[in-house]
Every structure is written in structure tokens, then in C-alpha cells.
Amino acid sequence: SSPSPLSTSDAAALVEADLGEQPAELVLAESTLADGSTSQIVFVHDAKVNAVDLEQLCVRVGWPARPLNKVTTALRNSFVVCALVLRISRPRANGDMQMLSESLVGMARATSDRAINATIWDVLVDPEFQGQGLGRALVEQLVRSLLRRDINNITLFADAKVIDFYQNLGFEADVENIKGMFWVP
């Protein structure tokens, strides 16, 4: 079935009255592993996402493969790209942290006319990390980023199985009886 278009009738309902400054990074979860290393899930704003890493994440989520050259172009032409990365690090003798690994576990992006409208695309979280509120945090941070830029007409397309997820974030289907239209060759 075709995805249903969703939009926010009042996008500001997703955020507090004071949006504050956009953090470049925000630690969403942190834990200490058995070997003493630290595991963090970090939200990264304006992330530089590698198309191969994104497509590997898409496979883990169960999405169909897309041509890498098109994914690269889509990422490059996006207005905002936000990522969730898993960082594993350990303390050095001097107290600094040494990064051992970093991997993409979630992403969302938006295209925009850079003035009025934006559409959110490719919202996905690795199944191993779903159910922890990370998808919600990812979408909320992306919406905040758009609102900070005074873009208030925010839309997205959602499969039927995730409509409730987006409605719980303030998105509404068929706002003012407006329907999404699709050109079908």
C-alpha cells in the first residue's frame, strides 16, 4: 500500500516554547560495559552519513536496497541530516577517552525549500536499538532543528504500521482534508 502523507497542524506542540540552540551532538544514552569501556548513543545534527553505512542500516531494518549513487545524491541534497551513532570508547591512562568504534544505528533527513516547507525522509533505527525512545528523540530533534530555522510546515510519508508512532509525536494524517498525491507512471 502507498504510504500516507502526514503533516503537523501545530508543529510547535512537539517542542517546548524555548527551542534553545541546536546542539551539534547530544548523548541520549550511556552505559559502562563489562570491560570498562563506555557505550554511548549520540544524536548528531548535520551528520555526514556515508551512503554505504546508510544502506547497511536499511538492510537491517528490512528496507529494499537503493542504488548507492542515488542515496549519495539524496544525502548531499538534504537540508538536514541527523544521525544516531553508537560510540564505544575507553579511558586512557591520562583520563582522556579513546574512541574504539563508531557505527550508524539511526538516521533521519529532511528536504526543504529553506523558507516555509520541509519533508522528513528515511527515519530509521536499527532493530537492535528500537523500543528505547531513540526514534522519538531523533524525530523530535529533527523537527526542533527545522523550527529553529522558522520552517513550520513539516510533512512526512509513513507506512500504515508507523502512523501511530508519528501521531504520538504530533503529526496528523489528512490535515484539513488535504490528501497527498502521487504521480504513478
Image (cartoon, rainbow, N blue to C red):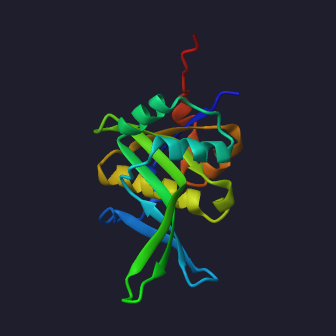
On the image, the x and y values in percent for residue 179 come to 56, 27
x then y, percent, for residue 90: 49, 79
Q: Residue at x 31, y 66 (%)?
A: 20
Residue sitting farthest toward the front: 93
Residue at 52 percent across and 58 percent down: it is 103
At 40% across and 56% down in the image, what residue appears?
144
Split into 4 quadrants, where in the image is the N terminus?
Answer: top right
Q: Which sits in the foreground, 22 or 177?
A: 22
The percent position of residue 79, horizontal first and vertical second, equals: 35, 41
- In the image, taking residue 29 as reference, residue 110 lies left or right, namely left
Left-right relation of 109 to 55:
left
**Residue 140 location (% of width, % of height):** 48, 57
> Between 55 and 183, which is closer to the camera in this rendering?
55
Q: Is residue 12 visible?
A: no
The number of discs equals: 0
Above or below, 28 against 8 in this view is below
Q: Nearer the viewer, residue 22 or 67?
A: 67
Q: Is residue 89 above or below residue 106?
A: below
